[in-house]
Image: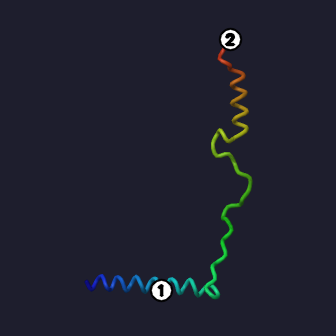
């Protein structure tokens, strides 16, 4: 029973310390500004082969070349 009370007090103290540390870094407890994304927002590369236009062109070229007819 004593262990649970000590554990509860420790958790409450930690929460108070964390909230105080967060609030001390901001004037009037104002929310922090959002961070910029870590990676640059450049052109998006294809994720899968069917997203890649070059792959689709090559696939179409191969399909036209090999239409399944005997040579």
Please report the residue visible at 67 percent of the width from the left and 61 percent of the height from the top.
Answer: 39
Please report the residue visible at 66 percent of the width from the left and 72 percent of the height from the top.
Answer: 34
Judge from the rendering whether residue 60 lies leftward or rightward of residue 11; answer left or right: right
The quarter in which the N terminus is drawn is bottom left
Please report the residue visible at 66 percent of the width from the left and 14 percent of the height from the top.
Answer: 69
Please report the residue visible at 33 percent of the width from the left and 86 percent of the height from the top.
Answer: 6
Question: Where 58 sits versus 34, above or below?
Answer: above
The quarter in which the C terminus is drawn is top right
Mark 1 — residue?
Answer: 16
**Callout in the foreground (1, 2):** 1
Q: Distance between the residues labelled 1 and 2?
A: 81 Å
Q: Position of residue 24 (x, y in %)?
A: 58, 87
Q: Position of residue 10 (x, y in %)?
A: 38, 84
Disc 1 crowd rating (10 Å Cα; few below 14, some 14-19, many 20+) is few
Judge from the rendering whether residue 9 lies leftward or rightward of residue 17; answer left or right: left
Mark 2 — residue?
Answer: 71
Q: Position of residue 63 (x, y in %)?
A: 69, 24
């Amino acid at each position: 029973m004593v262990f649970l009370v000590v554990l509860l007090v420790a958790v409450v103290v930690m929460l108070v310390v964390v909230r105080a540390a967060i609030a001390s870094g901001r004037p009037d407890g104002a929310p922090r500004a959002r961070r910029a994304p870590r990676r640059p927002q450049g052109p998006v590369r294809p994720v899968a082969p069917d997203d890649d236009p070059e792959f689709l062109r090559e696939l179409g070229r191969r399909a036209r070349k090999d239409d399944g007819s005997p040579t």
